[in-house]
Amino acid sequence: MHPVMLLPTGADTQALRKALWHYRIGHRITDEAEGQLLWVADPRQRDELQAVVGRWERGEPLILDGAQPRRAANVQHLTTTLRHVPVTALMIGVSLLVFALSGVFGDLLVVALTIVPVGISGGQLVYGSLADTVMGGQVWRLLSPAFLHFGWMHLIFNLMWVWYFGRQIEQRQGSKMMLLLLLVAGIGANLAQYVTGTVLFGGMSGVVYALLAHVWLMSRRAPQSGFFVPQMLVVFMLGWMVFTMTDIASTVGFGNVANEAHLGGLLVGLASGWYYSSQRRKA
């Protein structure tokens, strides 16, 4: 069982329980000092459970009749979810838009979003300094590389994890927290990569590792917070980061990975996860 949310003390949950069992969502409700704690048996059903609870809280019908198309219900669920996670949705939307526009404008768009302006002179790559770039007003370049992706697999892999981890953070700690993590982790990861002398890099991977670390520490140190991440996923993600840092990765075709960005994002997430889980444990 995994904790999901607190319901008001004394609330009549009979209709809610009936609806959850109707949709075959295994659950349990326990009485706690702060209220009634709702648990879910399968964490993969967390979003579906929250959608039912949302309808219960708004006084809407809990069990959709057969006359209402399932497709319409799915669209409504997706719309409701996106409305509750605007920062996560924006991150994905901007990344998709940048990827689509890069197919139209090519390198013109890429060089507009790299951490510093780049160009070719005498057959050599030339680029400005970060200090001059920021002082010149191009502050967006501190974050913009995070929205650059160099291939479908790169894009899909990153956005899949942004959606998985971002929803948890935004639904449980709010959009301001998610925006803060995006800014701090995105800029921190980009700067970590830049100080190694690299200017042509991009991707949301640094932010993804920050989200992973944040969710993992929250789930481990403050289990009542409702965060969840499978331990094997943590092992895989950390193992992948270590693997891409080795010479073997470049030998088998995984060269040019922004390893320092991954590490920088991970450190940001560990710091934020430790801080906020400590705050939750004191409460």
Image (spheres, rainbow, N blue to C red):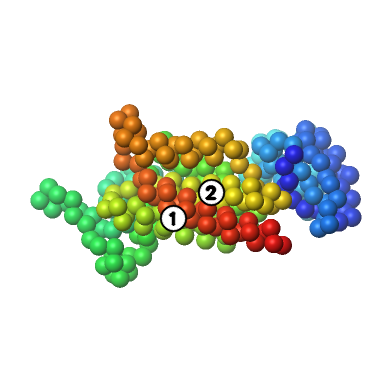
Q: Residue furthest left?
A: 122
Q: Residue 181: x and y, percent?
A: 51, 57
**Residue appearing at x 37%, y 45% in the figure:** 259
Quadrant for residue 142, please give it: bottom left
Q: Amino acid at mark 1?
A: Gly
Q: Residues within 10 Å of mark 1 (few under 14, many from 20)?
A: many
Q: Nearer the viewer, residue 150 or 270?
A: 270
Q: Nearer the viewer, residue 11 or 69?
A: 11
Q: Residue 235: x and y, percent?
A: 53, 37
Q: Residues within 10 Å of mark 2 (few under 14, many from 20)?
A: many
Q: Residue furthest top?
A: 252
Quadrant for residue 248, please give it: top left
Q: Residue 110: x and y, percent?
A: 30, 50
Provide the secondary structure element on which disc 2 rests.
helix
Q: Is residue 55 left or right of residue 231?
A: right
Q: Is residue 104 left or right of residue 235?
A: left
**Residue appearing at x 30%, y 30% in the figure:** 251
Q: Nearer the viewer, mark 1 or mark 2?
A: 2
**Residue appearing at x 55%, y 57% in the figure:** 272
Q: Amino acid at mark 2?
A: Ala
Q: Is residue 60 visible?
A: no
Which residue position holds label 1? 186
Badge count: 2
Quadrant for residue 256, please give it: top left
Label located before the other in sequence (1 or 2)? 1
Distance between the Cα atoms at labels 1 and 2? 14 Å
**Placement of 237 over or under 142, stated as above or below:** above
Which residue position holds label 2? 213
Disc number for residue 229: none
Q: Is residue 272 visible?
A: yes
Provide the secondary structure element on which disc 1 rests.
helix
